[in-house]
Amino acid sequence: MVKRPIAAMVAAGLAVAGLVACSPDELEASQSSTTDGGGLSGELLFWENAGLVRLADDGTTPDVENSFLHQAAKMFEELNPGTTITIFAQTGDLSTSAAQFQAAVQAGNGPDMRSQFAGGPTLSYADYYADISEYLDQATIDSMSGWITVREGYEPDGRAVAMPYGAGLYFTVYANKKVLTEAGLDPDNPPKTWEELIANGQVVADKTDYTPFWVADLEGYVGAWLVGGHIGGELGEGSSAAMYNGELRLDDPAIIKAYQTWADFGASGLTNPDAGSQSNQEGGAGFVKGDVAYYINGTWQNTNILEGLGDDATWFFLPMLEGAQYPEAIGGGPSIAISIVENSDNKELAKAFLNYLAQPEIQDMYVKMSQMESSNHKDADPSVLTNRLLREQAEELPGLGPVVFPFDSVMPQSVIDVFYRVNAGVFLGSITPEEAVAQLQAAMEIELADR
Amino acid sequence: MVYPACYAFYLSFTRTKGLSTRWIWFENYTRLAADPVVHQVFLNNVKFLVSVPMVIAVALVTAVLLFEKIRGWRFFRVVFFIPNVLSAAVIGLLFRTVFGYNGLVNGLLGTFGAEPVEFLTKGKWAMGIIILALVWSGFGYQTLLLLSGLTAIPTAIYEAAILDGATWWQRLWRITLPNIRQTLGFVFIINVIYTFTALFGFVFVITAGGPGYDTTTIDYLVYLRAFSGSQMGSGAALAVVLFVIVGILTLIQARVFGLNGKDAV
């Protein structure tokens, strides 16, 4: 009878000894980078949350062979023997991922580097990130575009807390040529306005058994793209900074109008009936089954759409509302931002990896592997754009504009969270556009008071 | 326990994103009072209180049946407790799968020719599903608590009542319920506390508080504010308000059920 407690005490003692042996100080020491003999060594922890990692079909496991960040890390490790880059792909929604990041940093076991979406999702955590200009030389900074999206306050002289990566992603409507043709519509003549697009959807509904629009709005993302895009069409390029700085109220009539359009779309009956239950990850699969006319998403879906529909795939940028002040506005902009975490113990190694990623040929590799966007480096190689849809987009973009950095890229994370939530509610008719903007304005006032 | 509680109280008077802190007195509280989202979420929690009488009613009936040793009572006693050994995440996933748009329930409805229902994306339905999950997962534990109260009642009282010709209902109302009043009071109190503080797991997994804020509870909003929205001060202030509300409700219930330190379970 006495043996069992003694055994338990011995086991507990061994466990405690084991834990002490692996104490945080020791772990940190073993993970910290060194420049032993002039070469780099150590382990770098990189949390990814913006599309630099390609996931396998299960949506959680990295597809290492086709994942840019994994391949870049592997090449870096080969160039720098003794270094290890551990990549953790944050696969939850943006809010959850941000919460995990903050909690980890506060607990002292956060990453050394993180990639997240540019704009609000980066700047909301500016305190957590180091001034990136201390880790890149001026020539490297000057060789890349998109810096305004990672500078505090969106000011040209604001502290840069990340390195923008990629030329930008844009809100796009994908279309299935076969379905449109069967409905008697011309796939090579895309609608010029949102109202024309809805009318086309009605034609598909009237003349075929196909679903006019595939929407996957469980998280409220589709609403974010559509509302954000249409706000850009109504208010133009300067509206983003004006909203962020509190100069433009979020219950502005133009924003209510964009929300009303979204509410009307939800009530139109032209979407898949489970639009509110479909997650963003499931959305692409629903469209490429081939029995849907249109899919509202963004250029980040280029590869999936082309792989799924092949020659039947076509696209056009999200059309603005009839009578919009900026009828050719494009919603989107720089998407990926790479940061060094302020309290990292491995800043030297992080600096080396950041500079490695900043090289034009490595950025070309990103473009080649992802086919979502062009490079934002001035020495980019355009021949790496092999995806037909991406090539067409790159050709069309220069003739259009203004490009409006959208709401869910610009605003602070707390407002973006509310934005996604109310978008889902407006689409399903559980709240009105007026209630939605009132909630957004209330959230923004809290943020403004924080500054 | 004292340190985190005091620290949360301190944070509620500050503005912080976790790394640096600024003292702002009562600003977090005044903003909460004027925040339409907070109003909606408080109302949601009040609606969730519907689950309390439901879970207690189910638990009471079950406890009485087990107490009377109905056929197979030993088996049912184990079966009813099984949900309690499952985590909220597992239960949430189960309900999300069963009531999803392409889930079992809609499949069954389809066999009768009915249109599928968006259980999890229509506010009232979604709240109902969470309440159902709460009742299903909680009634086994409440049953055991009530059963312990029932077993404390001297059997001689029942024997005397039966000899006097009391019916089953009369025994329930005149003997059983008065004798387990304090146990019942305790079960009421912990259920109200659960409703305010333990719905997080279900809400997180089943609806993530949506659509909009239709199923967001105060504890979930604390998480959203403090971690997702990086407003630790606002989240802490909300947590303090929640603590005060739960405390007041507990005191009121203790008074109503006549609980005191000596008699409480």
Image (cartoon, coloured by chain):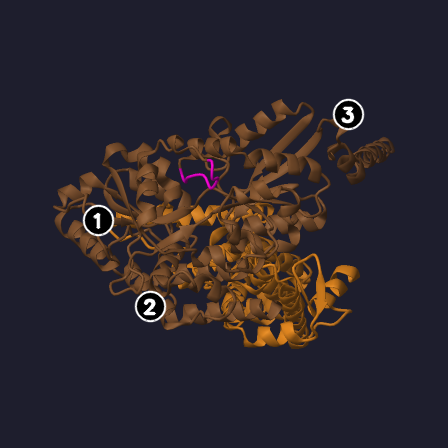
Tag 1–tag 3 contact (CB < 8 Å): no
In whole angstroms, how far apart are the C-alphas of marks 3 and 2?
Answer: 63 Å
Q: Nearer the viewer, mark 1 or mark 2?
A: 1
Occupied quadrant, residue A163: top right
Secondary structure at badge 2 equals helix
Label located before the other in sequence (1 or 2)? 1
Q: Nearer the viewer, mark 3 or mark 2?
A: 3
Q: Position of residue A346 (x, y in %)?
A: 71, 38
Q: Is residue A288 depicted above or below A230 in this figure?
A: above
For residue B70, side relative to residue A219 (left or right): right
Which chain does tag 1 point to?
A
Q: Is residue A294 magenta?
A: no
Chain A appears what colour?
A: brown
Q: Is residue A407 depicted above or below A28 in this figure?
A: below
For residue B249, side relative to residue B76 (left or right): right
Q: Residue at x 71, y 63 (%)?
A: B21
Q: Is residue A375 magenta?
A: yes
In whole angstroms, how far apart are the C-alphas of marks 1 and 2?
Answer: 23 Å
According to the picture, the residue beneath numbered tag 2 turns out to be: A257
Q: Position of residue A189 (x, y in %)?
A: 18, 47
Q: Residue at x 56, y 35 (%)?
A: A357
Secondary structure at badge 3 equals helix
Label located before the other in sequence (3 or 2)? 3
Chain letter, colour orange:
B
Secondary structure at badge 1 equals loop
Q: Which mark is residue A37?
A: 3
Residue sitting nearer the eye, B146 or A252: A252
Q: Which residues are magenta?
A: A372-379
* Screen quadrant of the N terminus of chain A: top right
The disc labelled 2 sits on which kind of residue?
Lys
* Screen quadrant of the C terminus of chain A: bottom right
Tag 1–tag 2 contact (CB < 8 Å): no
